[in-house]
Amino acid sequence: MPPFNPAIAATFAPPVMEARRWLDGVTFPADRLLINVSQAAPVDPPPEPLRRAIAEAALNLPQAHLYGPVLGNTDLRDAVAEEFSGAYGGQVSAAHVAITQGCNQAFCAAVTTLAGPGDEIILPTPWYFNHKMWLDMQGITTVPLPCGEGMLPDPDQAEALISDRTRAIVLVTPNNPTGAEYPAGLVAAFHDLVQRHGLVLILDETYRDFDSRSGAPHDLLTRPDWDRSLIQLYSFSKAYRLTGHRVGAMITGTDRMAEVEKFLDTVAISTSQLGQIGAVWGMRNLRQWLAGERDEILARRAACIAELGALPGWRLKSAGAYFAWIEHPFEASSAELARRLVRDASVLALPGTMFAPEGDPTGGRHFRIAFANVDAAGIGQLAERLRDFRA
């Protein structure tokens, strides 16, 4: 038997890939084709003008095919700094910005600069499974923080979990997997908490472009010394359908950037040039288009709340951005029911067990519904199938 890193070997398999394998050998009747609510990544390519900008860069810009700066291209770092300064009312400079190969890599880079084997990081549950996977791979202990009413975490409960090995608290808002939008006051309270204890708040805002609220979702970037206790993450994948180009961003203190640069230079050297070109072009030219995309997602959220919220026996706990978190009425675990939904209802959804600690009974009671790629009519069909499903 060849040697394996025990931390990698002990990490669970990628949930989305596992769920896709449930489709192997399954034939769906013509009058009940598959409704796939397992993953909310955009299924359409970027809008044609953005694709043209990328194509022209590929043809005409030699540097588009070469290594770039490890921390990202200057024009994109400048654009991110300008966007976040304006949107949040703070002072963000390009020196506070790193461009990464997607937001997952931004999270990995952030954690790697903060913690090592044996350290602890607090994650609200249900959690985004890739966050848990990376902590497991690094030998970092994940400390679960169960969410309460509205699928919101409690700062007081978090404070009770802090030990001398705690290095950070992670928040995702709007949340994956629950869709919950964290109130500004709650985010502020968590930032106060990490400042009191000399920790760092990792704030993942991958879905910020689809927040239902207007204005800044928090005031952290206006606070003195925010850059000492905050690492804010962002993704271009959802906003501009650039999933295949892998472009994300991290905003944090300049003193951390030297450490971030070490990580990025080791794992990727530089982020995709064509992806960065597409991202900056999108920021400059697609504001109105993105506003329309947000309107459509919010309409689907409203349809989801109306349809799933009315399901007899089911309980919709939260919904926002791309996701809804729903409790089912059956005795069986969602881990078992998810496979039966594929076979009996032509619905592919991820069970809550994929977002919860092993043995946590709340995981078996819930499903994540990724509704962003299903229109209002499709959401109605989804509700009908769940209503008719019998365990």
Image (cartoon, rainbow, N blue to C red):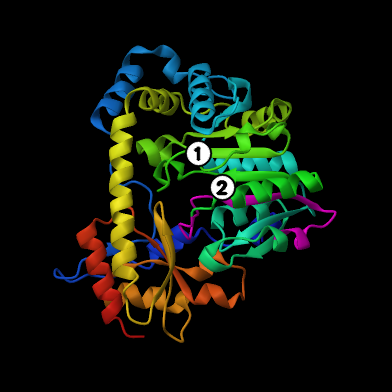
Say if mark 1 contacts mark 2, CB within 8 Å.
Answer: yes
Tell me the kind of residue under disc 1.
Answer: Ala
Residue numbers of the magenta segment: 158-180
- Name the kind of residue labelled 2 in the image: Ala
Badge 2 crowding class, 10 Å Cα cut-off, few under 14, some 14 to 19, many 20 or more, is few
Q: CA distance from mark 1 to mark 2?
A: 8 Å
Measuring 61% from the left and 56% from the top, which residue is drawn there?
132
Q: Quadrant of the N terminus?
A: bottom right
Residue 60 image point, x, y percent: 33, 12
Q: Residue furthest right?
A: 164
Residue 184, which numbered label? 2
Please, what secondary structure does the residue beneath circle 2 have?
A: helix
Q: Quadrant of residue 145?
A: bottom right
| Residue picked out by circle 1 | 216
Mark positioned earlier in the residue sequence (1 or 2): 2
236 to the left or right of 78: left
Q: Residue at x 35, y 39 (%)?
A: 241
